[in-house]
Amino acid sequence: MKIITKTLLNISLLLIAATLNAQFYAESINDIKVPKNFIWGTALSEYQVSGAAYCRNSNWSDFETTLPERSGDACQFWQRYKDDIALMKQMGVQSLRFSVEWCKIEPTEGKFDADALQHYVDVCDALLQANITPMITLHHFVHPSWFEQKDGFADPANIHYFERYCAYVFEHLSDKVHLWCTINEPTIFTFQGYARGVFPPGRTNLISAWHVLRNMIHAHTRVYHKLKGMKNGKDAQIGLVHQYLKFHSYTSWNPLEMIPGLLFNALLNDSVMEFLKTGEFNGWFGVHYNAHTTKNNDFIGLNYYSRATIKASLDLSNPVDAAHYPDEIMTDMPYAIYPQGFYDALIDLKALRIPIYVTENGIADAKDEHRDLWIRSYLAAMDKAIADGADVRGYYYWSIMDNFEWDMGYEKKFGLIEVDRQTQERKIRTGAQFYVAVLQNALANSNSI
Ligand code: BGC
């Protein structure tokens, strides 16, 4: 009897999942209607495309010496950016989200490198000349070794270093750049670096993870208000980038799946969502921060990939596992294609009543089998969310090109552009064609409502 009930339950779960997903699919680019002035872009981060060879003396270049695969010189974006921007222009990219690397700007505490700053001035100029709007991320998982040695974001007394670096970059680039992301995914940085220990500094201490997350939210808030008070601050659009990630139990009855889900959801999503909605951060273990205002973002940057399905496993060394339902299509990452979750995230963020930029969304798909499906279904989900009132102003595909996927190395291929790392040759993937058509259509300006 129990087995029959369980089977029926699982079958109905599968049917629900299949129906929910089926409603999102764009047959043609005309199925995607976005508001006037919508920005169609792509994203990258410096470390992932330039590697440790160009970003020495950073938490990541130090940490990756312990990993099986090292970043090396990645796609040599640091020196090839002009050609890459020319290719983006040819594709019709309207905006590029990229990170400025703190370890380049301030390699030694308090000593700012004028050449590194000039490099970013040149990158911005090259983008603007190509009619590509720059969007800067000030912290994308990487910071200088000297900052890490002071215990990085684990020590709230260090926040002022981050604030000083951000103000320096803003002072010199805000004449050219209006879209600013403070910190990329504080939750992922914290979870991977302080709970799982697979990102620097490689710690596995849940209590300290909550403290780091609180400090990063605090750092974001301080930087936001600091930059708003500077020249060009009022005209700039400044926001936090949050990866909206919901954990979900494979079954609806197994506490071994539900209990970890509670913790993961609190740390990875709910605490930051609550902060965004109320200005108050309430972590576990009494970790608390109150910004005393909800006006801490001009927009919210949404990174959305999928949900994480947890399944209890008999392997006691790894009691919960990333899973998926048999009818779901997997990506090369441990999660499935799940556009419904993208729709849900956009609708949840609508409650913030500030503009939303989708700052990352894309698939790891080395065989390029499902990229087209991903793009069509996620854009359809976004289209529905916009029709239902989500104030989405832009979408940035992750990533413009294959790059270093942190602890997972080069095997994961997220690029619209395939990169041969031996020859550094670039090739636009077949699965990217639908997005290229969207970009070209947007350039011809015929898709506004
Ligand atoms: C990060 C990117 C990463 C991407 C794909 C996001 O969490 O911001 O740096 O490459 O996900 O995993």
Image (cartoon, rainbow, N blue to C red):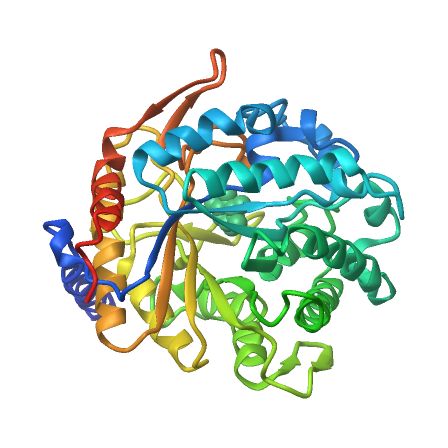
> What residue is rendered at 15% in x and 55% in y?
25
> What residue is rendered at 74% in x and 59% in y?
167
Please provide percent x and percent y for residue 22.
14, 59
Q: Is residue 443 visible?
A: yes
> What residue is rendered at 26% in x and 39% in y?
436
- Give the mark count: 0
**The image quarter in which residue 409 lies:** top right
Q: Of 119 and 240, which appears nearest the observer?
A: 119
Please provide percent x and percent y for residue 392.
35, 67
Q: In this picture, is 19 found above or below 432?
A: below
Look at the image and tell me in which quarter the C terminus lies: bottom left
Q: Is residue 407 visible?
A: no
Image-based side of 209 in relation to 344, left or right: right
Image-based side of 115 in relation to 314, left or right: right
Q: Of 37 and 247, which appears nearest the observer?
A: 37
> What residue is rendered at 83% in x and 63% in y?
160
Please provide percent x and percent y for residue 284.
67, 76
Please provide percent x and percent y for residue 438.
23, 47
**The image quarter in which residue 394 lies:** bottom left
Q: Residue furthest top?
A: 423
Look at the image and tell me in which quarter the N terminus lies: bottom left
